[in-house]
Amino acid sequence: MSQDIKTKIEQLTAELNEYNYQYYVLASSVISDYDFDQKLKELESLENQHPEYRDPNSPTLKVGGDITSKFTTVKHRWPMLSLSNTYNEEDLRDFDERVQKGIGHPVEYVCELKFDGLSIAITYENGMLKQAITRGDGMQGDDVTNNVKTIRSIPHQLKQQNFPDLFEIRGEIFMHKSAFVRLNQEREENDEQTYANPRNFASGTIKLQDSREVAKRPLDCFLYFLYMENRNKTFQTHWESLAAVKQWGFHVSEHSKLCSSIDQVIDFIHYWDTERHNLSFDIDGIVIKVNEYAYQEELGFTAKSPRWATSFKFKAERVETILEQVTYQVGRTGAVTPVANLRPVLLAGTTVKRASLHNANEIERLNLHEGDTVYVEKGGEIIPKIIAVNLDKRKENSSAIVYPTQCPECGFDLVRQEGEVVHYCPNEIGCKPQIVGKLQHFIGRKMMDIQGLGDETIETFYKLGLIQKITDIYTLKDRKEQLVNIERFGQKSIQNMLAGIELSKEKPFEKVLFALGIRHVGETVAKKLALHFKNIDAIRAATIEEIATVQDIGIRIAESIHNFLKIEENNYELRLLKDLGLQFEIEEKEVILAGENLSGKTFLISGVFAEYSREDLAALIESHGGKMISSISAKLNYLVAGDKMGPSKLAKAEKLGVPIISDQELLEMIN
Ligand code: IVH
């Protein structure tokens, strides 16, 4: 058996290496991306089971072919701080005054473009690129070395000799506007999610786990800051260091300027405020840095940012365009969202075609008419916003946009509950986007977490008439002959999916309740309902008022649950799901857990909690008779787990079958 695996690993390794060679060296694609990925995944999984058989040159490790299942978090040698912002001349003069006060006289500034991408810290050792780390939270970031190595303008090996043995260089990874437009167009044609702007595209790309995919997306990088031990012995100023790193082979922007007064800085800013539109990439401001390293050190840092630098943010750009049409999107819950379709216009480097109008009130607020000329603005936000209508350009006799009274998808009368701004289509069981959306919600990671079944597959199955209702997911196993005929759906994928579906039957009642997609029933509400009522029959039997007695559940939520369970079709489906083996009551241990006092029970608390300190929780447990213990063993009754808990602890508790509960569940046990 293990000999077979060894042979399979060797065979896949040789095959994939050949594909890589064809792709990168000969620039020819002899296998589809999909098939390549499937093979790579298969190899990775075999290697994970048998690391001893992994070839040192395995394609799973290679740049441009490396699949990273999770990036390693690395602490920054020098924290990556952010910059303070200025928005007008006055702020800038204040900054200059503070600097002059600190130093005692006027100083030189280096003005640079503020590239709108994602920052990166790259370490070089003896001229070789060693490691590239994202900003992360400023103290630690993700190791994305393999992905960064695919960026053509970042050297792997420095050619010049006069660089220090060890240094860190910082810069901004970005995508040129033309590449962004081209790639987004391709994505749209392939029915893939498009990115809102080049920055999102660049940061989405650098976080991809398949560096082969990264390599296909042209990214660029400007370097703008050097860190090394005893830097002041080699360079006296930032300006000098920029010239040097350029010599070493790095891509340094040519649009920086050394200024001897704040007036010159302001001129630079004015120039780029208009000239920025002619750049091939997006900038969102100007960075101003004190030039002398000695002065930088003297000025130091606040907790968040250096006192020796600041940024000037350009104002959000505003353009005028024509409103061509308002269309309406129906979501999973039946919420109907109006979308403004605009005559395409270039705004802050992106072509804007659509803007969200949120709800009927927004249409009214703007007093939108057909064919109106509208002002569209984009700040740092992803989705552009219609700010107002240019009334001078309103066409005579144009009619006002009226929010529909019927669902654009199924024709049902829309409803808006009192006090709510959103209109809903009430046809939960017959309106297509609601059906597909609900099925996609059901399989989601935080709900039933069905492995091997994704949103796109749901869409395909729905189109093919294979699934309509949740129960259809659980009867897919009886339709294997139809499944095998679906393109790109191999025997293995079918097996994985069916196994995932079967496994989901183990999901606890609270997850099932959340997965059903009842309006207003989110993760927490589902948990509270499950704990309080213990099973679906009890919830069904309860009146709206009784449901509303549960802590944090108001009348609106209670009504929604009650109404859902009043519909006979829903109940019929729930009965079928129960017969199929899904959980509709909480397990015995949870029943005890909800009611009993803590005496005689042992607890361990780990991780970080949003509302309580670990000490607070421990005190609470002890005051209710529980006992704290310090390690995970078979003696432990409950592990109270918060965020950022170590994976090994979690794994150990899971292995020993120790119930893992949240702080909220702990409180439920006490109350
Ligand atoms: S210097 C402590 N220079 O802006 C010095 N940053 O808001 C920190 N940025 O996180 C950075 N262009 O991602 C610097 N020419 C430039 C920059 C630049 C863009 C980004 C960078 C930083 C953010 C701060």
Image (tube, rainbow, N blue to C red):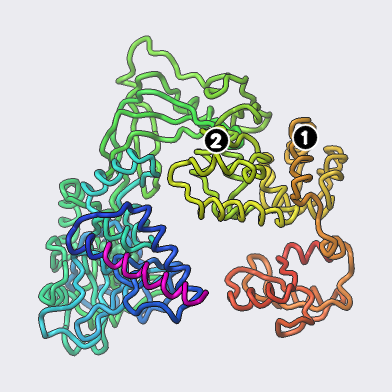
Does residue 660 lie above or below 369 as drawn?
below
Residue 390 is situated, as x and y percent measured from the top left of the image, at 33, 25
Quarter location, residue 414: top right
Majority SS type along the magenta span: helix
Quarter location, residue 483: top right
Does residue 651 lie above or below 494 as drawn?
below
The residue singled out by tag 2 in the image is 462
384 is within the stretch colored magenta: no
10 is within the stretch colored magenta: yes
Pointer 2: residues within 10 angstroms few (<14), some, or many (20+)?
some
Quarter location, residue 636: bottom right
Q: Residue at x 55, y 35 (%)?
A: 462
Q: Residue at x 74, y 43 (%)?
A: 577
Q: Secondary structure at mark 2?
A: helix
**Nearer the N terminus, badge 2 or badge 1?**
2
Taking depth in this image into account, of 626 and 183 the one nearest to the observer is 183
Residue 654 is situated, as x and y percent measured from the top left of the image, at 68, 72
Residue 628 is situated, as x and y percent measured from the top left of the image, at 78, 81
Camera sees residue 447? no
Query: What's the CA distance linking mark 2 and mark 1?
Result: 21 Å
Residue 241 is situated, as x and y percent measured from the top left of the image, at 16, 77
Does the residue tagged 2 have its C-beta within 8 Å of any atom of ligand 1?
Answer: no
What amino acid is at disc 2? Tyr
The residue singled out by tag 1 in the image is 572
Instruction: Please indicate whether residue 573 sits to the left or right of residue 596 in the image.
Output: left
- Mark 2–mark 1 contact, CB under 8 Å? no
What amino acid is at disc 1? Tyr
Disc tally is: 2
Range covered by the magenta-colored residues: 1-19
Pointer 1: residues within 10 angstroms few (<14), some, or many (20+)?
few
Q: Residue at x 51, y 74 (%)?
A: 49
Q: Residue furthest top?
A: 397
